[in-house]
Image (cartoon, rainbow, N blue to C red):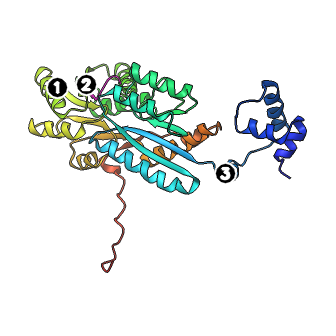
Amino acid sequence: MRPTVNDIAREAGVSLATVDRVLNARPGVREKTVKAVNDAIARLGYVRDLSAANLARSRSYRLAVLLPDTESQFIQSLAAALVEAGQAAATSRTELRLLRFPAEDPHALAALLGSLADRDYAGVALMAPETPVVRDAVRALRARGLPVVALVSDLPNADHFIGIDNRAAGRTAGVLMGRFLGGGPGQVMVLGQSLLARDMIERRRGFDEVMLRDFPGLEVLQSLETHGSPATLRQVVVEMLANAPRIRGIYAMGGGNRSLTQVLAETGLSGKLTVICHELTPHVRQALTTGEIAAVITQNLGHLARSTLRVLRAKADRQPLDAAQEQIRIEIVLRENLPVLPLPSAIDPLA
């Protein structure tokens, strides 16, 4: 027979109420007693059925996910995946609230984070660049006992990071770029939305590691920040093309792919430069088929969204994570291996 809480209470020499307080990490129990209960759990091999326990005490999870309010196809696709995951998890007493913040306003984000502590949330996930004011806001939430996880781009003081290994993704981009260009000679332009974002920093670091080690005949130029502005992207790309005539490739570390392909088309360079980017958005899919983009490094957004909910619930329950289940894999997509889109569901003409 499986051990029960009654067995734990007898083994530890405490009351059922004390066992319940320890299992649910409630205050008011001496450290010595907590150790006695945990030792009894270990000796008995007790495994808690969290689903049953949560159902018995009507435990629910109200989770907040914060995303920048932009027209980025990647952000819109991620938001849709999160909503879908939230709807699927509704039957397990999980409520997902998707909140937006101005992409270039860290103070607005910090204010939004500060408002969550008193709104009965069980956990918070956010995709945001790293700034001092955001770090302080995350630290304040965690001090209040609210778990905070970072999405896509890591934050140094979050409880957990959900996304691909961005340094490895940058190294992957370096291998692809170097091999596509035959090792050189030539120059490579690098575009990034913001160098305050940890994912951009790590991707650039990984890219440089491979290019310097394996493809020294290719000169990698300085990173150009676009701040999510099509006008800024257009300006920096046109200026760099005019001042660096040996450019043969472009590494787009994140965001702005629609604007980039448009600028290249207008300058007569569409399909003539090797462009490697991130995330398989609808536009990138089309650009792969036409040869405007050579390769895309992407991640499964459905997996990322479901992992977000699982991690937040585990953090709320102070339970360990299944590291293998939550690892988001790096995927490389070329024109030749584009995944087939699912067919739209049939519509009843009489409905």
Judged from this view, the residue extending furthest toward the front is 118
Residue identified by numbered label 3: 51
- Whole-angstrom CA distance, mark 3 to mark 2, is 46 Å
Which amino acid, mark 1?
A: Val
What residue is shown at x 48% (from left), y 51% (from top)? 86
Q: Residues within 10 Å of mark 2 (few under 14, many from 20)?
A: some
With respect to residue 43, does 51 lie above or below?
A: below
Discs 1, 3 touching: Cβ within 8 Å:
no
Disc 3 versus disc 2: nearer the observer? 3
Q: Picture coordinates of residue 276 (x, y %)?
A: 29, 36
Which amino acid, mark 3?
A: Ser
Residue 225 badge: 2
The quarter of the picture where the C terminus appears is bottom left
Residue 275 as seen in the image, left or right of residue 41: left
With respect to residue 104, does 71 lie above or below?
A: below
Q: Picture coordinates of residue 264 (x, y %)?
A: 14, 36
Residue 261 as seen in the image, left or right of residue 69: left
Residue 236 badge: 1
Discs 2, 1 touching: Cβ within 8 Å:
yes
Is residue 117 found inside the magenta-colored segment of the image? no
- Whole-angstrom CA distance, mark 2 to mark 1, is 8 Å
Q: Picture coordinates of residue 153 (x, y %)?
A: 41, 31
Q: Magenta segment, which residues?
A: 190-196
Q: Residues within 10 Å of mark 3 (few under 14, many from 20)?
A: few
* Residue 162 visible in rendering: no
Q: Secondary structure at mark 1?
A: helix
